[in-house]
Amino acid sequence: MDTLPLAVTGDDAGPLTPAQLRELYSLMVAVRHLDTSAIAWQRQGIIPGYAPELGQEAAQVGSGYAVDTTRDFVFPTYREMGVARTMGVDMVGYMSTHKATWHGGLYDPVESRLAPIQAVVAGSVLHAVGWAHGQTLEQKDGVALTYFGDGASSQGDVHEAMNFAAVMKAPVVFFVQNNGWAISVPTDRQVAGGSVAARAAGYGMPALQIDGNDVVAVVEATRRAFGHARSGNGPVLIEAMTYRRGPHSTSDDPGRYRSLDEERDGAGADPLERLKQRLLADGAADEAFFADALAAAKAEEEQIRTGIQALGSRPGTEMFDLVFQETTPALQAQAANWREESEHV
Amino acid sequence: MSNSILEGVDAEGDSTADSTADSTADSTVKGTAKNAESPATTVMSMQQALNRALDEVLAENPKAVIFGEDCGRLGGVFRITDGLQAKHGTQRVFDTPLAESGILGMSVGLAMAGFHPIPEVQFDGFAYPAINQIVCQIARMNYRSRGTMPMPITLRVPSFGGIRAPEHHGESLEALFAHVPGLKVVSPSNPHEAYHLLKYAATRPDPVIFMEPKSRYWQKGEVDPGNADPSGGAPEGAKVMREGRHLTLVAWGAMVARCLQVAELAAEDGIEIEVLDLRWLKPIDTAALAASVRKTRRAVVVHEAPLTSGLGAEVAQLITQSCFDTLKAPVERVTGFDVPYPSGDLEDEYIPNIDRILFGIQRVLEYKRG
């Protein structure tokens, strides 16, 4: 499906250069390696839990690659590590959410242009609409990119967000990663009509349903959507068809709801392998490049892991100090009481 | 109420009476006398006072935006935003589609973008569809973002009962909101309070649920725009609306006016009731509660919300904690019942009325230990 009328103009108009394709590959390898390592960290007791995005590297890196962090803002769920890495977010700060250090992560969301990680399915989609409308009110040209999944598409907030954005012509790109599964429930038991993209028509909004495992297609689609929204034409919906190759989280057991054969069939070709073959076919990269990219990914993961392991708990006073900008006497009294009693233990 | 109760009070002798020696009958109207005497005051309805406050907030803060269902062209179903769109433009005051979660979720994004959103939920009962955004997002974003993304959102909610409205148009949600970490809750009782509390709430960097007592929208009163508080400070904490020495009535919103009526009636029997307008339901002004009840040694808390786990329980505990040694009787609660808010025909049976409040007072005054 492609109901987006406008072509991309300006700097993003041309095809991706070989250097950009190599950069995308390097990002995808870094994300893949960090993602699979995080599962190992959990098994080793370094972090208590993690929500892997194995198989969604093209969708996440490709869409994050289209973001202009000088003016756009991104609203993630809890499974957008690849987006964060692509945007250049401090990854120790990002992964700290999975170390249970701080819910939203320790990275600076304002600096990073990435809203705090939050765990309410579809919770941040409306925030993107509000932020985007703020751009309209201030006559700025930023675009809000909001992520959600096929499961979240069932939430009322997503529909309210699409309607609000369309009515207000807010510059929002709704980026759906349809990874086939909402924990144990497959898309055909989740999405009536079989497509989230089809719903955009009901809101008078153009939509693109794309191969979410083809990073080039993802970058191009997201750039087109950004161009459309940035030009004052209102929101766009992109449904990137991908596959959650791993479990929902490190606590999940996919064996209870899908077989290995089903996994293999559903997953299709590996998005990294697809880009690798393209780079080789184009003569844009050689084996040495791929080896270097993997080595860099390993070095990066080691650095992040070291950072995560070195990360201590936040001081308990932050529980109290960060609730309000202007604290209350009751909260101060509770903090004082906590301090006194904890010191006596 | 019989004179014997009063005699009992006098005969017992209040050990704390020294602190209130000047609380004679002629001083009981002190709380309101000041405004009436000030030349700068204007008589207006609460609706007008709120409208004026919003007008000034928009003029003073270019980042303030007002929106919600029918807030723009219509001026809101209660006309609180009347004329504001015409004056400040459709960028500052605008209508949204009819979806409360959308309105509140959008507020989060606007706050992230540096705005001061002043959304309206048209009626109390329609805050429920937005609870997820209020509780899981607005209340937590400052915390989640480690203080980098404050939520200066002033959510106006026409609240409480008393206007013979349909179902879901007369709810009292203060306990629900007050229970949520990260929210502050305030309710004005008269036009003066409405003007100052809204102006104050709408300049705070934290989310404030502003509960407007819709049954008081059309009641007029003196508003002194230049004088927020008798103390000369910001309108924070509770406020003594009438001084007394025998018992403290604690109330907020529309119940304050009713308690003042009750105090007037009780005064005919020589019972001097202090009426404390709590104003801020979170944070609760525990010092003011303690100061009043240490003096009167008796307290009745009055609210429209259902009894069980209502804010009256919190107030009673705070009083007990600070005044246990001197309390003459357990803190009494006069409240709505643990029933869904009834239809208009039965509304007067549900909302605490003068008689029920007097009965509550009587139970406290007649209480004997042992």
Image (cartoon, rainbow, N blue to C red):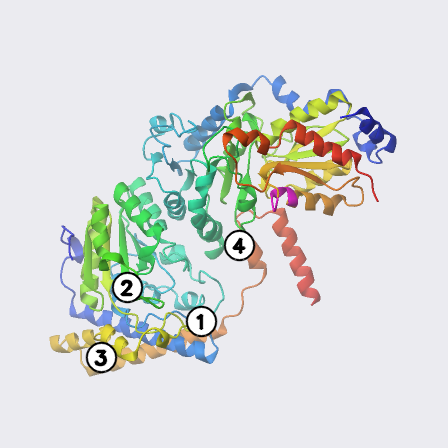
Residue identifier under label 1: A49
Horizontal arrangement in the rendering, residue A79 relative to residue B253 (left or right)? left
The label nearer to you, 4 versus 2, is 2
Residue identifier under label 2: A187
Q: Residue at x 85, y 36 (%)?
A: B15
Q: Do callouts 4 and 2 point to residues on the same chain?
A: yes
Residue identifier under label 4: A322
Q: Is residue A2 above or below residue B244?
A: below
Horizontal arrangement in the rendering, residue B262 relative to residue B83 (left or right)? right
Q: Is residue B50 above or below residue A309?
A: above
Where in the figure is residue B68, as x and y percent of width and height? 38, 37
Q: Amino acid at mark 2?
A: Thr
Sequence-wise, the earlier of marks 2 and 3 is: 2
Horizontal arrangement in the rendering, residue B162 relative to residue B108 (left or right)? right
Sequence-wise, the earlier of marks 1 and 3 is: 1
Give how far apart the Cα atoms at labels 2 and 3 are.
Answer: 37 Å
Sequence-wise, the earlier of marks 4 and 2 is: 2
Give the quarter of the image for residue A75: bottom left
Residue identifier under label 3: A289
Where in the figure is residue B160, as x and y percent of width and height? 53, 34
Q: Do callouts 2 and 1 point to residues on the same chain?
A: yes
The label nearer to you, 2 versus 1, is 2
